[in-house]
């Protein structure tokens, strides 16, 4: 999702790249443009004829009137991608990129496994739809909302104001030579745009708050009218439109469950069961058990974790803020899946297993399997403590990037669990 959001605002942060040689200015000509040009240069929500809508994640069909194929290039990797625009209501949907423009580039097939479809609304709704294979031929349909269904995402800083761009001497052809676009750039910033519109004055001013698109291309309102950004260039990133078609395509999201709500419901049920299990386990501890102290220590740890997670869940339910822009909610989600807490629990659990195994050996010194297990557990607890120290160091090293720290800690945990003493 973070990558998706970076792509939303890349329009305002990209640099200029080399363009092709100048061509004559014959874009719209003396007339009113071709039927194709007139048809694609329409976006009522951008030009101000319509107001953007607040889209709901799974209550109604999401329909589109423009299909836009684009080509992107980054670090030598070229990908083809398909975007869908609703130019009346103000939202964009797009499929996963592909390395070639083969068949099915624009297919929206929600009932196929590994389906992923993103929808971005100009009102700040950001939804990811995906279909996962649960095994045995069962497919699950999820929509991740990141809280933007209640608290819309807003671009950092102001999304109002104007950005002036000056006309340059480069012109390019697009959409099988049906569209010609002139290059424009802001002199204070290095980004370069190729614009298609009805006229091409020496200077234009982008209305920053009136843009519909993604990846730096799309519909842009200016002080001289509506334009389409056909291409945006950068030394390490390029995006250009290869085709635009009028369509009548709808995506039905009603089968998709709200993933965050299901997570909260399931997590709440699990916490209730854990509380009940802690009470049952405490009732089973015998006063004469040599390992009673270890059992109690594990129960205390589980109680502390349950209390912390209850607080995190309360924070998520209470704020209902979008995960993308609320650090407290982000922290709450990270805490509930932090491998460092898992390691700390595993250390206490392994200490209990060592105690139980030692008691078994005391009763039967010739128990070779128990001897082997004890050796494994003693080595494993050393690795657990070493991994705990590594995770703590990662938290310190990535204090300003806890998401990266979480990913690296998860990798450490998965690697360690391959050598457990099961």
Image: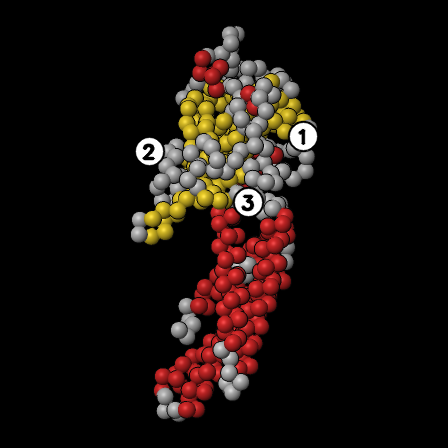
Question: Residue sitting at 65 percent across and 20 percent down?
Answer: 223
Mark 1 → mark 2, Cα distance in angstroms:
40 Å
Mark closer to the chain start, 1 or 2: 2
Mark closer to the chain start, 2 or 3: 2
**From what the image shows, is residue 54 above or below residue 33?**
below
Residue 225 on image: x %, y % = 60, 18
Residue 160 image label: 1
**From what the image shows, is residue 275 above or below residue 39?**
below
Q: Which residue is mark 2?
A: 103
* Residue in front for this viewpoint, 235 or 401: 401
Question: Residue sitting at 58 percent across and 72 percent down?
Answer: 300
Q: Nearer the viewer, mark 2 or mark 3?
A: 3
Q: Which residue is mark 3?
A: 146
Q: Nearer the viewer, mark 1 or mark 3?
A: 3
Q: Nearer the viewer, mark 1 or mark 2?
A: 1
**From what the image shows, is residue 237 above or below residue 135?**
above
* Residue in front for this viewpoint, 175 or 68: 68
Residue 398 on image: x %, y % = 61, 58
Question: Residue sitting at 67 percent across and 30 percent down?
Answer: 160
Residue 61 on image: x %, y % = 45, 31
Q: Secondary structure at mark 3?
A: loop
């Amino acid at each position: 999702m973070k990558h998706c959001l970076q792509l939303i605002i890349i329009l305002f942060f990209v640099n200029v790249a080399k363009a092709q040689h100048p061509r004559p200015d014959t874009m719209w000509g003396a007339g009113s443009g071709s039927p194709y040009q007139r048809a694609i240069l329409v976006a009522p929500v951008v030009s101000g004829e319509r107001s953007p809508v607040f889209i709901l994640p799974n209550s109604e069909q999401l329909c589109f009137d423009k299909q836009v194929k684009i080509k992107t290039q980054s670090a030598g990797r070229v990908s083809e991608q398909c975007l869908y625009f609703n130019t009346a209501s103000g939202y964009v949907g797009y499929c996963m990129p592909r390395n070639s423009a083969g068949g099915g580039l624009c297919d929206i097939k929600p009932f196929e496994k590994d389906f992923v479809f993103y929808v971005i609304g100009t009102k700040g709704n950001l939804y990811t739809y995906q279909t996962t294979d649960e095994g045995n031929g069962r497919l699950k349909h999820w929509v991740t909302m990141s809280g933007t269904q209640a608290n819309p995402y807003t671009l950092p800083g102001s999304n109002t104001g104007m950005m002036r761009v000056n006309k340059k001497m480069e012109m390019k052809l697009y959409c099988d030579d049906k569209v010609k676009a002139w290059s424009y750039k802001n002199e204070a910033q290095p980004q370069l745009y190729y614009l298609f519109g009805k006229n091409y004055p020496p200077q234009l001013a982008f209305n920053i708050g009136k843009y519909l698109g993604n990846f730096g291309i799309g519909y842009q309102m200016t002080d001289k009218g509506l334009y389409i950004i056909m291409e945006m260039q950068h030394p390490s990133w390029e995006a250009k439109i290869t085709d635009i078609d009028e369509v009548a395509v709808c995506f039905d999201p009603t089968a998709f469950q709200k993933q965050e709500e299901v997570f909260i419901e399931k997590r709440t049920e699990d916490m209730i069961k854990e509380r009940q299990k802690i009470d049952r386990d405490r009732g089973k501890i015998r006063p004469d058990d040599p390992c009673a102290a270890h059992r109690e220590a594990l129960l205390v740890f589980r109680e502390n974790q349950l209390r912390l997670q209850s607080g995190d869940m309360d924070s998520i339910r209470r704020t209902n803020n979008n995960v993308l822009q609320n650090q407290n909610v982000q922290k709450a989600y990270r805490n509930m899946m932090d491998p460092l807490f898992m390691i700390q629990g595993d250390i206490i659990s392994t200490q209990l297993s060592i105690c139980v195994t030692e008691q078994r050996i005391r009763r039967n010194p010739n128990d070779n399997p128990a001897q082997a297990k004890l050796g494994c557990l003693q080595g494993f607890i050393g690795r657990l403590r070493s991994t705990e120290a590594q995770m703590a160091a990662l938290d310190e090293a990535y204090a300003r990037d806890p998401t990266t720290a979480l990913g690296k800690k998860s990798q450490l945990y998965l690697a360690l669990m391959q050598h457990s003493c099961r």
